[in-house]
Amino acid sequence: MRAYLRAILVAGTALGVAGAAMAQSSSPFSGLFGGSSESEGPVALDVQVASGDEGLTRQIRQSLLLTGALNEDRTTGQDVLAAARGDYARILGLLYDQGFYDGAVTITLDGVEAAEVAPLDAPAQVSRVVVTVDPGPVFRFSRAQMAPVAPGTEVPDEYATGEIAGTGVMRSTALAGVDGWRAYGHAKADVADQQIVADHDADQVDSRIALSPGPAVTFGRMSVSGNQRLNERRLRKIAGFPEGERFDPQELDTVRQRLRRTGVFSAITLQEAETLSPGNTLDVDLAVVEQPPRRIGAGAEISTTDGALVSAYWMHRNLLGGGERLRIDGRIKDIGSETSDRDDELTIRLERPATITPDTTAYVEAEVAQMREEDYDEDLATLGFGLNHIFSDRLTADAALEYQYSRVFDANGRTDFKVLALPMDVIWDRREDQNNAKRGFYLSAEVTPFAGFEDTSSGLRALAEGRAFRSFGADDRFTLAGRARAGSVFGSELATTPRNYLFFSGGGGTVRGHPYQSLGVEEIAGPDGPIKTGGLSVASATAEFRVQVREKIGVVAFADYGQVWTGDAFGGEGDDHAGAGLGVRYDTQIGPLRFDVAGPVSGDTGNGVQLYLGLGQAF
């Protein structure tokens, strides 16, 4: 017998297939079926699938309305009957998706076929539900053809002769064909026709999909609505809508991202016009919803040796009506530290998006800090102006011109440092999740040429860091994570280099198991012996093995290593240390809550077990 299967598929509508058989009595295959059952609660649910396919059994159970009803304690006879009657179509749809077109399905309620029970004749109570499915043979493509296809279109590999002919594959293929033409500038591309014929004797499907590309399109005008506090001229500058350029859906995504980055809006909608304007131009309607302009936030970390760190910020997202962002950050750290006094920091930053280009943000930043380290005190003030450019979601660059003044008090008395610097950095972030990465990598590079005044040296500070993540096992249960960091100050003498340009090691951000900034160098002579400062060069490495033991709970084993040198280019005297430990992670909506226990493995800077509590992975 030969059944003809028709489908209407337009830009994301479901691909429907008719012709599968439904059994009307208890399954005749009960001796051949494997399945799963749940007997907890007042209603027992048993799912049985021919040949004992555990994967298909699990998928069917998860898709059932019955499963949802029982999980929500909707167990009256009427509830169970309504769910069962709706599950026939759900099961058949799942079978079609996987290439089974001769499926037989029975659902019995205490032995009575649910399809034979009238909706008004539902039993008062049901004690046992049995879902029996014989999927039949799997159908494969005898022909898989789509035309015309735009250059560069990525057609799914599964849409090919001999592959399983699931409706899901045909649906995704048609959507890929439409998306391919849209990416090629044909905004109104659509599915013109499809011929889908199933041969039930040969267990094959003949599939042909015809696409209608439509004309090549350019962007027309963008209308704007919903903005109340943000000036429309500035909104258009921030959006950077490419009027007059060839249509590309990726450009619309870029417009959304630019607007989203401002933080001004809670909702952004870009709607393409249904019909083309003269000259095959496409107008777009932009509707936005502004959110409250002010926001506050806070954070905290605790270490047994370094003490507590608390931070808070206040932000205004639209200070002058042009999307300007004012942010004030305050941070107090080393509260109760065993190795140093309290440090205080205050930063004020004003940003203006869409300066020069839609993807360039200009900023002015001022910072004051009072640092009370173990061997010296430092008061610091910095004022800078900079530009940040976003090349893509993954690649950003920053350059600034800043003046820094710092006053240091140590055993030798007071020393002033004055520099004019040009800090520049590039970040390439390919992590799939910045808060809890399981795959990808992160690379950053910083270069800061600086000119010293009076007794301050001139030189160049460089720092590079790389992180890599690799997961494996079921549901990416196991993750290997690594981080390497190296930096050096070139062309400057250690004693006349600003102290905050020098490098330390130790603490939660470098080597756990050793106190914060516990490893430095003792190169500068003092009246009572050498004074400890940071070194001119540093290198550190971290390795972590992360295991997700439950849905929200993970454990981590880690090892950290760091070394600091007195000279540039990793020369001169040097010392190193290492630490290792275990940690627990509890996943929250804003990232994993981290608790680490670490101890020293080598080096003489450790002084017992260190505890760390914070939000987010260590890196």
Image (cartoon, rainbow, N blue to C red):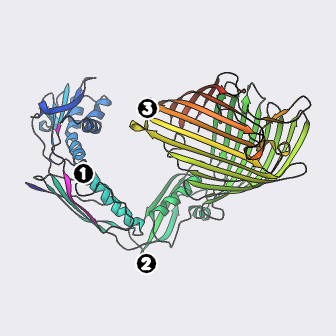
Q: Is residue 431 magenta?
A: no
Point 52% across, 63% down: residue: 224
Q: CA distance from mark 2 to mark 1?
A: 40 Å
Q: Position of residue 598 (x, y in %)?
A: 61, 26
Q: Amino acid at mark 1?
A: Gly
- State which quarter of the image contains the C terminus: top right
Q: Residue furthest front?
A: 572
Q: Amino acid at mark 2?
A: Gly
Mark 1 = which residue? 166
Q: CA distance from mark 3 to mark 1?
A: 31 Å
Q: Nearer the viewer, residue 442 or 62?
A: 442
Q: Amino acid at mark 3?
A: Glu
Tell me the SS state at disc 2: loop
Instruction: Tell me the mark number nearer the camera, choosing from 2 and 1.
Output: 1
Instruction: Tell me the mark number nearer the camera, choosing from 2 and 3.
Output: 3
Q: Position of residue 186 (x, y in %)?
A: 39, 69
Mark 3 = which residue? 551
Mark 2 = which residue? 279
